[in-house]
Amino acid sequence: MKFSVIIEKGENSYGGYVPDLPGCAVVGETEEETLQLLKEAIEMHIEALKEDGKEIEFGKSVVRELELV
């Protein structure tokens, strides 16, 4: 499974979230730590969805970069 993730650099930390999994968000001290925390959070989030009998939908979000001229 692949998920699009968004990482935002703050003044003192990095925030990350998964658009396809509402509520799945983390904060880390580095970009690398944030990515690792996101992996763990995604796994926990999916497990919770399974336990609740909810359908797992992924791949709805697409990341693209737009260049403004």
Image (cartoon, grey):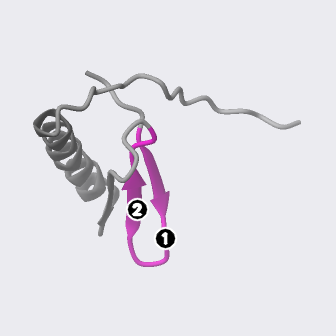
Check disc 2 and give the amino acid type.
Gly
Which badge, 2 or 1, comes first in the chain's sequence? 1
Return the residue found at the far bottom: 12
Identify the residue at image location x=15%, y=46%.
44
Quarter that holds the N terminus: top left
Q: Position of residue 25 (x, y in %)?
A: 34, 56
Which residue bears the numbered disc 1? 10
Task: Give the Cα separation between the discs numbered 2 and 1.
Answer: 7 Å
Q: Are marks 2 and 1 in contact (CB under 8 Å)?
A: yes
Find residue 15 and name its label: 2
In-front residue for pair 8/57: 57
Please tell me how crowded label 2 is: few (under 14), some (14-19), or many (20+) other residues with Cα within 10 Å: some
Name the side, left or right, on which 22 lies relative to 56: right
Badge 1 marks a residue whose secondary structure is loop
Name the side, left or right, on which 57 lies relative to 11: left
Identify the magenta region. 5-19
Quarter that holds the C terminus: top right
Asked if 67 appears above or below 17 in the picture, the reply is above
Occupied quadrant, residue 55: top left
